[in-house]
Image (cartoon, helix red, strand yellow):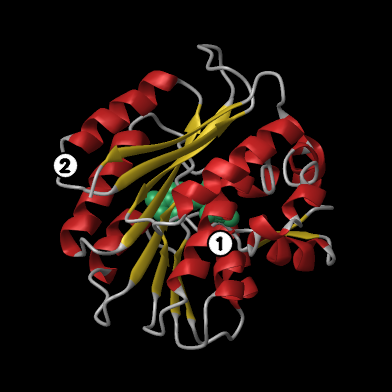
Amino acid sequence: MLSYRHAFHAGNFADVLKHLVLAKTIQYMTQKPVAIRYIDTHAGSGCYPLNSAMSQKTGEYETGAGALKKLLQKAPFAPYGSVLKQHLAAGKYPGSPQIAVDLLRAHDQLYLHEMHPTDFSLLGKWAGSDRRIRVAQSDGHQALKSLLPAVKGRALVLMDPSFEMKQEYLQAISSLEAGYKRMPNATFLLWYPVVQRNQIDKMISRLRSTPLRDVWQFEFCRTPDTKDHGMTGSGILAINPPWTLAGELSDLLPQIKASIAPAEGHWRVENLIPE
Ligand SMILES: C[S@@+](CC[C@H](N)C(=O)[O-])C[C@H]1O[C@@H](n2cnc3c(N)ncnc32)[C@H](O)[C@@H]1O
């Protein structure tokens, strides 16, 4: 089932957490000169015009990155803030491929996977002739297995499924495990929505049964958990994240909460499995 289109949601408050974490991770990893293989298993279309009918229909950007625009320009939110500023000036919200390509270097490589035919076509056009980028209309979970280990020794994986089906929670953990077994020193970021807390509990319980080490949970929710339908928040399960990230997010997530969810928001930064 491929009905999900990220253009409806680009720049919402869940994208803010995901892209803040992604940008900080790339910033940290690019401090070392060795080339990075960046793998986006669920890439979307690259960059999202905010005047599109899809974006206008939901207005999700306005209550996410739009509402946080000023805060995100503060120095501690760099480099996400500067990438955001540059693309907002052109009326677009930068998706994960755009953030990655802006922050990676000439000798890094990007492998982007997108199954939806329309979004794949948009992604291809967005990538243009940039020789660092390979796009494929293929299943990101399968592709991950063929792309790891990265021969030159460094890899960053963003796994950002659309969670249209319940089984995607456990599928994501199996995929992380397969990737980790191939390359235990790679960094993996798995984004998840907070819709039904029991799905996340099951996912984490499954994660604890794998050999994965150095696993962190970063989460931001606008409202308390509920059994009703609707996304109240989102999180990232991070494996081998930069050692600086937990401290930074412990400072930044309360600021996001104070700006957009002062009364009911909550956040967590937790080491689920030590090194
Ligand atoms: C949440 S969106 C990606 C957003 C993007 N990562 C960003 O942050 O800008 C998830 C995307 O994954 C695509 N997709 C769903 N299942 C997939 C699969 N098995 N392999 C690759 N792409 C998939 C969907 O079509 C959708 O465009």
Residue 83 location (% of width, % of height) = 69, 66
Q: Which mark is residue 210?
A: 2
- Image point 61% across, 81% down: which residue? 128
The residue drawn where x is 73% and y is 52% is 72
Q: Position of residue 274 (x, y in %)?
A: 24, 44
User: Would the CB of label 1 be found within 8 Å of ligand 1?
Assistant: no
Whole-percent x, y for residue 224 in the image = 57, 17
In this picture, is 195 found above or below 132? above
Residue 159 numbered mark, or none: none
**194 horizontally vs 102: left or right:** left
Q: Amino acid at mark 2?
A: Thr
Q: Position of residue 8 (x, y in %)?
A: 69, 43
Decide which of 62, 141 is in the foreground and name it. Answer: 62
Mark 1 surroundings: few (<14), some (14-19) or many (≥20) residues within 10 A:
many
Q: Amino acid at mark 1?
A: Ala
Q: For the point 78% across and 63% down, which residue is it?
A: 85
Q: CA distance from mark 1 to mark 2?
A: 27 Å
- The answer to whether residue 22 is left or right of residue 184 is right
Is the residue marked by circle 2 packed among few (<14), some (14-19), or many (20+) residues within 10 Å? some
Relative to 261, residue 2 above or below: below
Q: Residue 23, labelled with which disc?
A: 1
Question: At numbered mark 1, what does the secondary structure look like: helix, strand or loop?
Answer: helix
* Residue at the image position 30 percent from the left and 32 percent from the top: 204
Q: Which of marks 2 and 1 precedes in the sequence?
A: 1
Q: From the viewer's side, name the closer residue of 146 and 210.
A: 210
